[in-house]
Image (cartoon, rainbow, N blue to C red):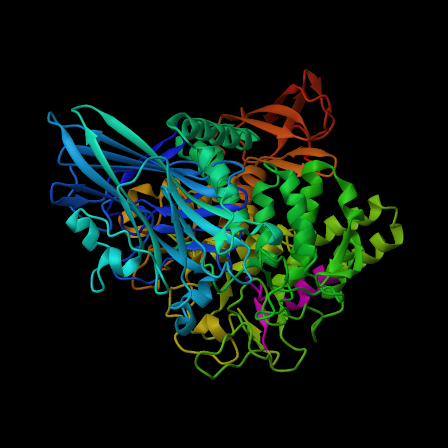
Amino acid sequence: MKYGFFDDKNKEYVITTPQTPYPWINYLGNEQFFGLMSNTAGGYAFYRDARLRRLTRYRYNNIPVDNGGRYFYLYDQGDFWTPGWMPVKKELDHYECRHGLGYTSITGERGGIRINQLALVPLGFNGEVHQVTVSNTSDVEKRVKLFSFVEFCLWNAYDDMTNFQRNLSTGEVEVKDSVIYHKTEYRERRNHYAFFSVNAPIAGFDTDREAFLGLYNGLNEPQTVAAGQPSNSLASGWSPIGSHCLEITLRPGESASYNFILGYVENAEEDKWEAPGVINKAPADSMIKRFSDESDVEQALADLAAYWESLLSKFNLQSHEEKLDRMVNIWNPYQCMVTFNMSRSSSYFESGIGRGMGFRDSNQDLLGFVHQIPERARERILDIASTQFEDGGAYHQYQPLTKKGNHEVGGGFNDDPLWLILGTAAYIKETGDFGILDEQVPFDCNPDNTATLFEHLKRSFYHVVENLGPHGLPLIGRADWNDCLNLNCFSTIPDESYQTTQNIEGRVAESVFIAGLFVYTGPDFIELCRRRGLAEEAEAAQEHVNRMRAVTLEHGFDGEWFLRAYDHYGNKVGSKENEEGQIFIEPQGFCVMAGIGVEEGLAVKALDAVADRLETKYGIVLQNPPYSKYYLNLGEISSYPPGYKENAGIFCHNNPWIMMAETVIGRGDRAFELYSKIAPAYLEEISDIHRTEPYVYSQMIAGKDAVREGEAKNSWLTGTAAWNFVAITQSILGIQPQFDGLKIDPCIPAAWEEFTITRVYRGDTFVIHVSNPDRVSKGIASIMLDDKILNGNVIPPVGDGGIHQVRVVMGHAVTVEA
């Protein structure tokens, strides 16, 4: 069943009941300040880093679920309630949540009072604005009280939830007029504070959680709200909060709006204080003045809409499929941008505490947003490359605040270096900015030890070449793309991290997946060498790629499909010789994407095996059969119950690799069939089974061997977003950025008659109309650019910043360029 509907005109998903199968969230913020907000106003906010600069507290795995957020309580003559239903859970006469692009609007009505809570992070603003509008829908005058509520986190979210012997004594606040200032630890090493303001006189306030709630009460029954009377408490240690009380009188039909701001301020060391012990409030005052009345919020919302319209206009599809257009034009690129901002750090499944930005993850995320904000992609590439080691390896993660590698996780994930080549090449293909290769970039974030970005790419390439195993395949290290396939770990100790524990010494365990990735990314490195005049370097690299291709065919194919790996003992993984885990999805996708086995007919065999062994009605499972017991030589992958996560779950991140592989062999119908199986807009009708948001991808869907087949987890922050955008826009619709232009090479269902794509590329706007009169899946008969027939299928940049018409006719008249 459905719990809402898509409003494509307003680019919103409208939720019509607060009791969704799981909290359905949205992200606020695009630059430095971010917030997570659920359809019942749950979630939290942070500045840049969800671990080190968290403003508000949130308890994961809480009872009830999603308890804690930015709440507004309405007190009406003894009755009190919240417009988002949670946390009070009083029955509402009306409820609606609209998740839009960078904002959320929640409306609740009860007893003749309607409240709308509009939440957004304005552009260029380090804070959340919550415009709360209270309306009297009854025929009598209403005298009510509005109580706001946030619970402050003591900045470092990990320390906040562990170091109680210190933290319960450090909380400090100031209150001045209608502003509550949270200044815990500001007296010593911190130069930042938070504030919570409202643009109206208040009848009182609370800053101490116990005084507001009552020691034994929950957020559903705060004693001050129940009594309709704030206590004017000042926090001293324990748990600081922010709560305003406003007295409101409304005639029938009358409304009143209030702007609440949850903001973040940094002061220079010399400007920390305005008086001894009194924080410098001038920056906060300036932020508050920006939103002094209702029209200021209206303008910020309009600016935000224009910002997103600009981003989304870079690629626009008009087709015969409403759900496809919805995904390509709105929700998939929106999720790509959120994933770029967050990597895998902060969602309702990622706490923001244990992970930073991923080296591999961020490079893959580049693929989905580089066309929207290439300048930020450039910055991200240089940040990522700075965490690389001199030998070409890299930190697996880094913190967004410090931009330094995470020592707790370290490196040794041997696929990581290759993703830097892929991400950098995607950026150059989009922008033509070869100059980025000359940027001086540190090794290990050491500014005294730098090399050009091109040198970093070279070391990435040769990190694979210099780390080959007995068969000539790449050594897997701690893990390759699948962090749960731990062939050198051999962990027997509970609570030990599979990824960070000391691996057994030995250079035997090899990855066929990395081999496919190497052959896939190799041509980009080779072309960059050539364009820098390094002919010998290019020739040497080509020989390495050719050798890897041959080795993969000789030692990486198992008769019907590609092997997954060789373990620490040199035994096959992902082979028909195995009792369990006989076939894996990853190498079938990437090896065929790389063209390995295409000429020999092995690619077709491998993809047919995927359809036969791995495909389900909800998508493609990661491997089959699942592991029914723990295998010491395989690690975490075998620790999950069958059908979940990496143990034969439908790992949506690598489903698009099979879609893309299918287009390599020309099977457009199969590619789109697989696309529609996991695209969120196509799953809205099964929301009660799927559970997570019907507007964004999830990382994992329970597989055919699971107890809860079809149930999704880990929504929002997943490489699924970028790879599915690449799969549909580049491989299926066939608009492929290249070093010298846009290559047009669709591979579509044969029944499709036509579609039109508007694509902004290097300052030019190309309106590309594709017709398919012969009902083929692949092949170009002709291309016309502004009434001139093109020789080949690459549209060169025009360079005039104008709008150019492109007419593409599919068919068999000419051979498509390789």
Residue at the outermost front position: 276
| x and y, in percent, of residue 335 in the image | 47, 43
Residue at point 19% right, 28% down? 250
Q: In this rendered view, identify the residue nearer to me: 797 or 99.
A: 99
Position of residue 25 relative to residue 458, above or below, is above
Q: Position of residue 135 (x, y in %)?
A: 22, 30
Q: How many marks?
A: 0
Residue at (71, 64) in percent of width and height = 444
Please state if 319 lies on the left or on the right of 538 as rendered: left
Residue at image point 68% right, 21% down: 785
Residue 280 covered by magenta stretch? no
Instruction: Assign the C terminus to one quadrant of the image.
Output: top right
Q: Residue 15: x percent and y percent?
A: 29, 39
Quadrant where the N terminus sits is top left
Residue displayed at 55% across by 47% down: 340
Q: Which residues are magenta?
A: 547-567
Q: Is residue 563 magenta?
A: yes
Does any portion of residue 118 appear in the rendered image? yes
Residue 346 visible = no
Residue in front for this viewpoint, 245 or 632? 245
Q: Is residue 547 left or right of residue 333?
A: right
Extreme top residue here?
Answer: 787
Horizontal and vertical percent for residue 561? 55, 61
Q: Is residue 593 left or right of residue 658?
A: right
Q: Nearer the viewer, residue 126 or 389?
A: 126
Front one among 164 and 312? 164
